Amino acid sequence: MNDTIAAISTALGVGAISIIRVSGEDSIAIVSKIWKGKDLTKVPSHTIHYGFIYDQEELIDEVLLSIMKAPKTFTKEDIIEINSHGGIATTNRILELLLTNGCRLAEPGEFTKRAFLNGRIDLIEAEGVMDLISSKTDKSRSLALSQMTGEVSNMIHQLRTKIADVISNIEVNIDYPEYEDIEVVTIEQVKENVTYIEKEIQRILARSETGSLIKEGIKTVIVGKPNVGKSSILNRLLEEEKAIVTDIAGTTRDVVEGDIAIDGILLHMIDTAGIRETQDKVESIGVKKSLEWIQKADLVLCVFNNNEILSEEEEELLKQIEKKTSIIIVNKKDLPCQLQLPKTDIPVIRMSALENDGIEELRAEIKKIFHLEQIEQTDYTYLSSARSISLLKQSLQALQAVKEGIAQSLPIDMIEIDLKNAWNLLGEIIGETYTEELLDEMFSRFCLGK
Amino acid sequence: MYEVIVVGGGHAGCEAALATARKGHSTLLVTGNIHNIADMPCNPSIGGSAKGIVVREIDALGGEMGRNADKSLLQMKMLNVAKGPAVQALRAQADKITYPKNMIKTLESTPHLDIKEAMVEDLIVENHIVKGIVLEQGERIESKCVILTTGTYLKADILVGDTRTRQGPHGEKPSNHLSDQLKAYGFDIIRLKTGTPQRIDKNSIDFSKTQEEQGDRVYHTFSFDNEIYYDIDSQVPCHLIYTQPKTHQIIKENLHQSSMYGGLSDIKGVGPRYCPSIEDKIVRFADKERHQLFLEPESLYYDDIYIQGFSTSMPKDIQEQMVHSLPGLEHAKILKYAYAIEYDAIDAKQLKQSLETKVVENLYTAGQINGTSGYEEAACQGLMAGINAALKLEGKDPLILKRNEAYIGVLIDDLVTKGIIDPYRLLTSRAEYRLLLRHDNADLRLRDYGYQVGLVPEEKYQKFLQKKERIKEIENLLKETKITPTDSTQQYLENIPTALLKDGITLYDFLKRPEITFEHIKHFIDLKTTPEIEEQITVAIKYEGYIAKANKEALKMVDLDNKKIPDDINYDAIHNLASEAKQKLKKIQPTSIGQALRISGVNPADISLIMVYLKKEYHHGN
């Protein structure tokens, strides 16, 4: 356990500053690789330094860095804390840099665990830990479980049952070999089941979007007829002049991109050319692209002009966005209403980009759709979802190993080992088994990086 | 005055008495009937899945069962050959006359061991320490340790249909008071039940309507002594038949007459889930059209045939109908009717890992009294109880086998940590590291322990060390020897067939190919080996990756098992501990964090509280 660990130790999505904490004997060496500023090997312990985080030649962030050398630290190991101002994307980027440079992602509560194991926590603090355990256990567990929707955990439960069926049948074959009339599990049956379960897990992974949305940002596309105010809305959200805004329809020729943060969660915005059948060569490429973007987007903001009646193109557009996560924006509400929208389940926001009226409502709606309130509430949820996703991926690997075992014509006894592994991993997600790593389990009730 | 008294002469009792006597401690074996020593009151077989591996483990530790079975074989088979190396196990049909006879011979020729025929009805207990036994007529025999291996004889009731008779197997006298006395000393008594099928006169069976089941065509032995006592060509076959629709109809129509299904209203015993009676099978698996039954010979010296899979507690007239509905048994003569037996057992959670009871010091229990079923399960506990009683007499630490070291370790840990509800049978699925607990490596796992405790004689131990050395040598040789793509090699590979070589490859890596066996290796290199050594090396190399993974997992467990919980821990002093957990921890008194974690109802949060508490205590101590 002498490896160096790193984790984001502030709640994600909240606050202007995020702290990335690194602990372990290589802390200073690893951080030095991505740090431009004072020589960290020479600075005194318990001091704060101003400098920059670089990925090779690329500047990532301007940061303050606290250095605390062993043994007078929380974990009794060298600790470095990087205070980043760059919001969630930058914070994640710094963490990734640390990981690629030799840190291991801290497991839930691992800093506390090290403090405990290294004898840092004394009598009073031990009492504190105890209180923490007893008060937080149920809450963190229920949060972890609620993260996975009932539906998903049901699905995982069913997959486990399916694996358990296969396993128990193999076990019976092994433990009662003389009974030839018990159905013998064939390799084909195992394969068939594994293939099915793999597909299901991939489906669940695709649906467990929240985790990846936090990490990669929500791909957002703004669509609508030319001159309905898409770029103005984008600019209001971006609060900078990125897209070219004019009164002439079709001014935005290229896809214009920009990132906005809604309470720390990244929206990766793409403004597009207006949707309109056109002869204009330059613009038609833009139109085609915007239709493509609708398919790829996590969120579609579909803008209509309050002052115009619904066109055929727009009716078509409404059909296109029906199956996507989308918001209908009726812009120019300051002008007389001409627009008659058909009945729809898609949320509708009325606003005026020109008068900067309604932007807040739009932000609120986006937050609501992606349950961003929940994410900022506590990082437990982020933690558990990242953990779940990683467990799902591990169980996919285990199933892959089952297939490899079959390909190598290993005996069923060996193949069952990987099957059991997959079963255990899935169980961990929904709390039906516990990991045998007692201490890891013990402190996993705590927030990652605390 | 003896150092050790063993109460009961079954498979547990024999191993226990032999272990203590062989270790030089004066031992008295008390049995209700000398003729029933090492008796096999149920199936005429030794071994089977997981159990066969236990017999190998007993042998590796210096116990007797493997050797004794080798001397008493009617038929021998290796099971699960195609299912993987970890689950292969030997199963023997053993002669019910020869097996006990050989065992009695061994007992009688063992120094420091006396045998006495008597019923034990009480213990001498002073200040929670056992000091000896009290016989039926009131005679007291003193000893330093007592090992109880009473089998099914505690308040045994034989159940057939609507009759309940207070007697043990073969109509033997049961012990009527010992379990009450145990209760008075503080043991929790549970009631269990098991059953056995009919015995049929061999001469009344038409074997032409059955399917013959032969033994293997290669020699096997349970014991690492590798001494062959049987002739491969003279093995006695078993015969396979199936239940008929008529059999099922008879059972369904008469279900209410079965002791277990209403024939008797006062059934308290819980039967084994893993060895159900035929009426259980038909009720629980109603959609199954037929069930397998095996006709197994009991002995060369008498004509009884055992119907494996047909145990029942129906009245005798229904049993007649049931048996006669079976193919080949239309005119069968039933020599003994099937019966169920109810008996008292103690709650194994009141035992330490050493099998010494927590309630009474120097008192050990082993076998069915602890809630297990099966000869092998009993024997291995007897051996461990004997070893640990002797070690205690010698002032040494007990021998506790870990879950990654032996099925014996799995069994005892399960018993004392989880307790039982129904009679416990060992299954491969109970072992989380079964890839490590193989038939082929039982000696590598346990011979050292056997030698250390003094049950494996020097000569055998040297033989084992040589084998170990030879395995290492050959493994190194295989790592050093390369084969290259010469014409003759490629030709040979093509004939196997296996992929041709592009570059040179070591024989070690070559053996990893699924289709390559040790025979192929011997084509390239002249090696002096034995089948045992070849098997060991082949398994170790072919499944290297999986074995390494299992070892890694096991180490995590060992790590937790090494985190000790002191005897005097006060669970009441730990705040916030869930009350269910507290109650169980107090009863089971786990000796390590690992064991505590295996207790059902104790969750990781409780464990963390214990750890923090221990840490705190530690600080106090300093």
Image (cartoon, coloured by chain):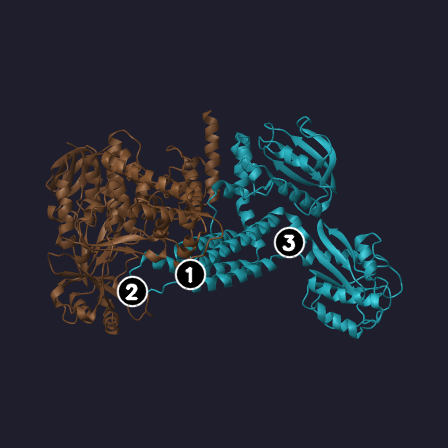
Chain colours: A cyan, B brown
The residue positioned farthest toward the bottom in the image shown: A312
Label 1 packing within 10 angstroms: few (<14), some (14-19), many (20+) = few
Mark 2–mark 1 Cα distance, whole angstroms, equals: 20 Å
Label 1 vs label 3: CA separation? 32 Å
Q: Give amino acid for label 2.
A: Lys
Task: Please name the residue that numbered disc 2 is placed on.
Answer: B281
Mark 3: secondary structure: helix
> Left or right: B519 with respect to A63?
left
Depth check, mark 2 against mark 1: the one in front is: 1
Q: Residues within 10 Å of mark 3 (few under 14, many from 20)?
A: some
Question: Does the residue at mark 2 contact the one at mark 1 (Cβ under 8 Å)?
Answer: no
| Distance from the alpha carbon under mark 2 to that under mark 3 | 51 Å
SS type, badge 1: helix
Residue in the foreground of this view, choosing between A24 and A110: A24
Placement of B576 over or under A300, stated as above or below:
above
Q: Position of residue B530 (x, y in %)?
A: 29, 46
For this orientation, the residue located farthest to the right is: A247
A300 displayed left or right of B482: right
Q: If the image is split into quadrants, where does the N terminus of chain B sit?
A: top left
Q: Which residue is mark 3?
A: A212
Could you tell me if residue B576 is visible in this image?
Answer: no
Q: Circle 1 marks a residue in which chain?
A: A
Percent of width and height locating residue A99: 62, 42
Task: Name the secondary structure under disc 2.
Answer: helix
Determine whether A218 is above or below A43 in the image: below
Q: Amino acid at mark 1?
A: Asp
Q: Nearer the viewer, residue A296 or B161?
A: A296
User: Would you name the residue on which mark 1 appears?
Assistant: A165
A119 to B288, vertically: above or below = above
